[in-house]
Amino acid sequence: MKNFRLFLAVAIISLVMVCCHSVSLLPTQVDVPLAQAHWQNTTLDELTKGYNIYASKCTQCHDMKNPKDFSVDDWNDNYMPSMGKKAQLNDTEYQLVLHYILAKREELVSAKK
């Protein structure tokens, strides 16, 4: 019976891990040239700062959204202006988050093709 419980626990944990597997939203070196095409001299460090702000401030009110789930126009015109105000992002934080989101979105959309 003890082995059965252990087996069952491992099976459940494995199933949860497989079902909950998601694309990593952490910025990588792949995102840097995509960002630099729009914002010259963008660095991985800046994209990482944008991700960290996004992961900490935006998730105070809702789950972390996948950047590819919304269009560039949605991010630029709807979500970032309103959510940036709610999250009380200063201008620098706003730009870091926006650059991260749009670069990661571009990478995820192009990887899907």
Image (tube, grey):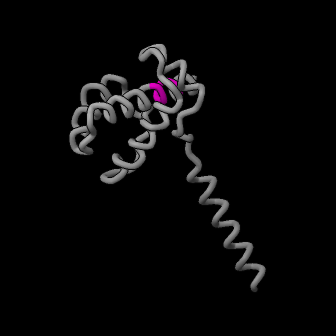
User: Among all residues in the image, which is located at the extreme right?
Assistant: 3
Residue in front for this viewpoint, 64 or 95:
95
Left or right, 68 with respect to 75, comes to right
Is residue 77 magenta-colored? no
Q: Residue at x 38, y 34 (%)?
A: 97
Q: Which quarter of the figure has residue 67?
A: top left
Residue in front for this viewpoint, 52 or 17:
52
Rendered position, 53 above or below 8: above
Q: How many marks?
A: 0
Left or right, 4 with respect to 104, comes to right
Can you say which quadrant of the picture contains the N terminus? bottom right
Rendered position, 79 above or below 10: above
Q: Which quarter of the figure has residue 74?
A: top left
Residue in front for this viewpoint, 52 or 73:
52
Residue 76 percent coordinates (x, y): 30, 25
Residue 95 percent coordinates (x, y): 34, 29
Tell me which segment is drawn in magenta: 103-107
Residue 8 percent coordinates (x, y): 69, 73
Q: Residue at x 23, y 32 (%)?
A: 81
Q: Residue at x 44, y 43 (%)?
A: 52
Can you say which quadrant of the picture contains the C terminus? top right
Left or right, 27 with respect to 64, comes to right
Residue in front for this viewpoint, 47 or 18:
47
Left or right, 62 with respect to 23, comes to left
Residue 9 percent coordinates (x, y): 67, 72
Rendered position, 39 above or below 70: above
Q: Residue at x 47, y 32 (%)?
A: 47
